[in-house]
Amino acid sequence: MKTAFVDTKRSHNDAASKKSSIRLDFLDGMRAVAALAVVLLHSYQIYGMDLVDAPAIEPFLSTPIGAFITSSYMLTRFGHYAVEVFLVLSGFSLMLPVARSHDERLSGGTLEFYRRRFRRILPPYYAALAFALLLIVLVPGMNALSGAYWDVALPALEAGPILSHLFLVHNINREWLLAINPPMWSIAVEWQIYFLFPLMVAIWRMWGSAAIWILTTTLGVMQLFVLPLTYPFSDSWFLVLFVTGIIGASISFSRRPSEIWLRERLPWNWLALGFTVAMFGFGVVENALNLGSFANWIKDILLGLGVTSLLVYLAKQGSCNERRPSLMLRLFQLPALVHIGRFSYSVYLLHAPIIALMALVLRSAGVPLDIANLAVILMGIPLVTSMSYGFFILFERPFMSKHARSTESKMMHRPTQGVVT
């Protein structure tokens, strides 16, 4: 009887160990794709492409290179949805340790969760904020309107933009929203959502995934019609996208019978495809009926459901350790993408001021606008990723958990392996 007890215990520990070592490198691969899509989008836009008042771009629209840039710009449209993808990935990643734990609780409690988020998010954020402000103060031309993308970052040296960015509340005022470093608007939104995460976990523990989905979707959409107060210039349904990621992690790893049934019975690959097609289909309807940006919440939620379905599908493949993983899983686990994904936060924080500086230097050197725009497009991603990795080493990696730093260090030697926690 004693031997049987020991064997059973060993078997249970082996199973738990196997479960905890599931490879989730595809999460970093997806982060990399989203981050690089944003860099490419803003590289196209840097001289004013697709912006309302952009006289700087007019002279080269009729040139062959300008025509090529204009026609190929549609290929970058995915970059507009990168924030939505990041939100889903964030909810999924933060929920992973909760869904995989035996007690379904935040490790260390609520205060410890906040401490980890403060340490992980704030030091790189403030370093990137200081970098952008220094460029604006020290580099001639960075604080001057030019009819191009960087104009939305100005004025930057006033008390309102600076203080609101220091306290991560710049999304509450249109004048501050895009100031200093335009992509940082989404950091404020996500930062505020983090404070609600422990409450979301508590609701999930008590009433399950369906309850938290219904509650947040109702509040997020109702706010559009009744209470447009919380994020007047940020999309109020972003909380729904974050919660969709939470539910995806629960379905992928929770031991609850209902989640196991969903995980095993539903065709998650086809659901991912279906929601994506529905999103683009609604976009066609939206344009045909001239609904305007008001209906963006429908597209975003469909996208969130599609990304979450893909996450469940890929996580299920990783759990089964299939010998022939899908093409999608192999794509998101490419070593180069996984590596970039590990410092994608730095890429997101730094890319706008870097490509703005690059564009300013080219224009100041007298390079024709079509050639300059093409140069930014071709060189933007390599320059941003190389500088962002240096920034990551200095300002992001030191504030990661010991386990995350250890995993990242191992990835430098064996880039095809790793565990995301």
Image: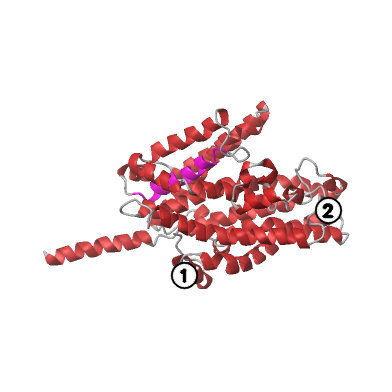
Tell which of 232 and 247 is nearer to you: 232
Tell which of 286 and 176 is nearer to you: 176
The image shows residue 215, relative to residue 86, as above or below, that is above
> Residue shown at 16%/63% (left/top)?
5
On residue 265, the disc is: none
> Residue shown at 58%/64% (left/top)?
336
The image shows residue 71, relative to residue 365, as above or below, that is above
| Kind of residue sitting beneath label 1 | Ser
Q: Position of residue 52 (x, y in %)?
A: 77, 40
Q: Is residue 118 magenta?
A: no
The overriding secondary structure of the stretch rendered in magenta is: helix
- Rate crowding at label 2 as few (under 14), some (14 to 19) or many (20 or more) other CA atoms within 10 Å: many
Q: Position of residue 358 (x, y in %)?
A: 77, 60
> Label 2 vs label 1: CA separation?
45 Å
Q: Residue furthest left?
A: 1
The answer to whether 20 appears left or right of 302 in the picture is left
The image shows residue 125, relative to residue 402, as above or below, that is above
- Rate crowding at label 1 as few (under 14), some (14 to 19) or many (20 or more) other CA atoms within 10 Å: few
Q: Which residue is mark 1?
A: 406
On residue 370, the disc is: 2
- Colour setup of the view: secondary structure
The secondary element bearing badge 2 is classed as helix
The span picked out in magenta is 236-254
User: Is residue 187 among the parts visible in the rendering?
Assistant: yes
Q: Earlier in the sequence, mark 2 or mark 1?
A: 2
> Residue shown at 54%/50% (left/top)?
191
Q: Is residue 244 magenta?
A: yes
